[in-house]
Image: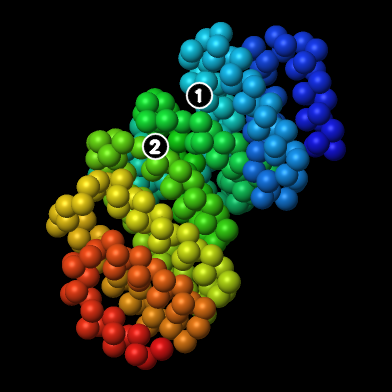
Amino acid sequence: MAVAGLRLLSHLQRLVPRLYENPALDVVTSLASFTDPRDPWTRPEASEAASSLLGDLLHRGSTINPKFLSKLLASLLQDRVKASFGKTNNSTITEQGRKTNYRLPGAADFSDSEVELKPWKFRDVYILTVFKWILGKLDETTIQEHWPLVIPPLLAILDDEAIDYKIKGCELLATLLSITPTSLLQKTGLGEVFQDALMLCLAYLPSLTSEEQSICLLDTVYPTLLVLLRARYPGSEFTAEKTAVLDQMVRIGILNGFGHAGEYVRIATVLMNRLVDLVNEMGIMSVKHLKVSILVILKI
């Protein structure tokens, strides 16, 4: 059904070229929701068709108006993404997408169920794919314009208790960091907020977490932590702050992981592979962890 609808839109585009010069937001939202072939409601041919239509739409619109893309993304974030995430609050950030210095507990509202509080998770599940598509269209300039609208939904996904959503949050954060200037992370103070959220993911280990889910999460969060580290501290110089973050990843993540779940062979394999990544990142600075690491590995 989706493929048939996308083919119809493609034919309409050829017959009425001006159809996409001022597209309805619903049309763009629908197309963007089919751009990820991993979604259960999407097939590869539907994803390819949707991406192609959106590409042509952006090309035509930007030819007419250089600010077309920025305005379109702003409308999607404000009227579609924010509308779905509006009830999901985060006390660690301000409305401007900055780290807050005073964390006040949010008022508990027991009148709303999780389904009502998180429509993006239960009713508007397609909105995560739309959000992912939006992030893929931002760059170092436009991310600064749309920062306050991007950060709340991203942290809501990353902080969700469900492992699958934490994994999606890590992937989305890695995409965001690839286009975020270091100066923006420093100015907003969100580097530390992102780090805290990611470090919490390292504790999702068996037996409290299923082995399969834990492996998927660990294989996603460690690379994302390294992407964040390089975004916050670019260059090869090892500052005290950069070294401290790497030390935490080894001690709190790898060594604690071996201590709590080292008897799970597949978990131990993941942790060994990630330890190699950290050693390569730290270079000679990793020597301080050598003695403890060897003792832990010998117990496997």
Residue 7: image location, x then y, percent: 81, 29
Report how far apart the C-alphas of labels 2 and 1 lie in the structure: 17 Å
Q: Who is closer to the viewer here, 181 or 190?
A: 181
* Relative to 154, residue 76 above or below: above
Residue 246 lies left or right of residue 253; in this view the side is left
* Relative to 227, residue 220 above or below: below
Q: Secondary structure at mark 1?
A: helix
* Relative to 190, residue 23 above or below: above
**In front: mark 2 or mark 1?**
2
Q: Amino acid at mark 2?
A: Ile
Quarter of the image for the C terminus: give it.
Answer: bottom left
Q: Residue at x 28, y 72 (%)?
A: 251
Q: Who is closer to the viewer here, 169 or 177?
A: 177
Residue 106: image location, x then y, percent: 41, 48
Residue 184: image location, x then y, percent: 29, 35
Residue 101: image location, x then y, percent: 25, 44
Q: Amino acid at mark 1?
A: Ala
Q: Secondary structure at mark 2?
A: loop
Q: Residue at x 85, y 38 (%)?
A: 1
For marks 2 and 1, the one nearer the N-term is 1
- Name the residue carrying label 2: 179
Q: Is residue 217 visible?
A: yes
Q: Residue at x 52, y 20 (%)?
A: 69
Residue 5 lies left or right of residue 181; in this view the side is right
- Name the residue carrying label 1: 74
Q: Residues within 10 Å of mark 2 (few under 14, many from 20)?
A: some
* Relative to 36, residue 78 above or below: above
Q: Is residue 94 visible?
A: no
Q: Who is closer to the viewer here, 136 or 103?
A: 136
